[in-house]
Image (cartoon, coloured by chain):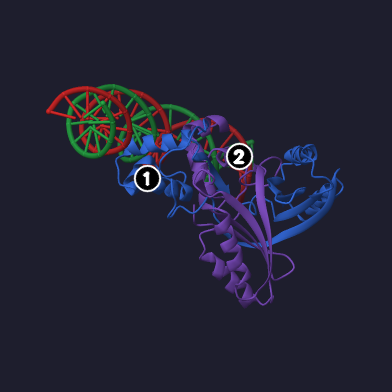
Chain colours: A purple, B blue, C red, D green
Amino acid sequence: MQTETDALILDEIDRKILAELQEDGRMTNVELARRAGISPPPCLRRVRRLEEAGYIKGYHADTDGHKLGWQIAFFVVVGLESQKLSVLEAFEAFVAGWPEVRECHMIRGGGDFLLKLVARDAAHENQLTQRLTNAPTVARVQTLQTIRTSRALSGVPMDRLHG
Amino acid sequence: MQTETDALILDEIDRKILAELQEDGRMTNVELARRAGISPPPCLRRVRRLEEAGYIKGYHADTDGHKLGWQIAFFVVVGLESQKLSVLEAFEAFVAGWPEVRECHMIRGGGDFLLKLVARDAAHENQLTQRLTNAPTVARVQTLQTIRTSRALSGVPMDRLHG
DNA sequence: AGATGAACGCAATTATATTGCGTGAAACCT
DNA sequence: AGGTTTCACGCAATATAATTGCGTTCATCT
């Protein structure tokens, strides 16, 4: 789950395991083995191997943000005044301290970031947006507020892929 | 994990459980109970209750897309020609069939979507972008390609929140 | 005070995870 | 070809964990 070593050669069974765990990360190994068509011990060994090689980075419960009081999810495209690495990294470090920032992607072209944030309500969202706008080195802020999400799949497609 | 009924009153222990499972969704109930400060049976009952009430929507393995051959992750802001509900829903249905589309968010303002996609390589990315550009009712396409992701947290902040 | 309901924890049971080991198939020499 | 090494499998045994049943406690309500 952590060591992140080198590349493995994955076969059909490994892909099936990855697909199943991507779908239901809490499935028992017995059930997983049944679906993969092998017995539990080798199935568990494969899972461990995938974890140790970094193909599986972790497991997470998918919680309902709305029910937990986070009414708003929004994306922000942030443009910085500089493309210098030190400035980019400073910005990443700046938002790293905000619990509301759930994702931070550096975007091609230099000096731009796409953030995903959550907020408890509109006032909170405004506060966060303002904080970004007023942040040092931030030149431009574009907010994309989510109205509804029709799809939110975890991971990657697990069909027809190489090893 | 499915029934999605009404709202619950969550206490400190529930929040701790949610926080822990958000962080490590495959933790054993014994360990979870230890961290939550209660014994395993009531801990399991709480987890079931959270699942059944929809606070936990599922569990997923977090796989390494890059290692699995999905070299590129990118976001696309799509503008449609119309804001009519039928058109919006048709677009959602259109992309719902693409395995490369991992997220589809309708954005405030009407007629806009933010998609997250993965692609095996640059050619594949171009193909996907072209397919979107040429899609019926699509008026505008803006691609935001991810260079690197410094943060990708699942779920929501679990501190200082209400029930 | 007595009744009611909710949540706990213990103890017992059932199921799962994990380890050790022998076996067979395929790849690899020589 | 024959011998050897490697690798993954599955069985069987053991260690852990999940789950259930039940009695107790505590807070609330009447």
Q: Nearer the viewer, mark 2 or mark 1?
A: 1
Chain under disc 1: B
Where residue B160 appears, as percent x and y from the top left, is 42, 55
B162 in relation to B54, above or below: below
Give the left or right position of residue D17, taking residue A24 as reference: left
Residue B71, quarter of the rendered image: bottom right
Q: Quadrant of the C terminus of chain B?
A: top left
Residue B151, quarter of the rendered image: bottom right
Rate crowding at label 1 as few (under 14), some (14 to 19) or many (20 or more) other CA atoms within 10 Å. Answer: few
Label 2–label 1 contact, CB within 8 A: no
Give the left or right position of residue A11, taking residue A40 as reference: right
Which structural element holds mark 1? loop
* Closer to us: C15 or B98: B98
As drawn, the label of residue B11 is 1
Chain under disc 2: A
B45 in relation to B34, above or below: above
State the separation of the CA atoms marked 2 and 1: 34 Å
Which structural element holds mark 2? helix
Where residue A135 appears, as percent x and y from the top left, is 60, 72
Q: Are the residues flagged by discs 2 and 1 from a single subunit?
A: no
As drawn, the label of residue B49 is none
Give the left or right position of residue A122, taking residue A45 as reference: right
Which residue is at 61% across, 77% downward?
A: A86
* Closer to us: D9 or A63: A63
Answer yes or no: is residue A28 visible: no
The amino acid pointed to by label 1 is Asp
Where residue A121 appears, as percent x and y from the top left, is 55, 53
Rate crowding at label 2 as few (under 14), some (14 to 19) or many (20 or more) other CA atoms within 10 Å. Answer: many
- The residue indicated by pointer 2 is A19
The amino acid pointed to by label 2 is Ala
Answer yes or no: is residue B153 visible: yes
Where residue B121 appears, as percent x and y from the top left, is 75, 54
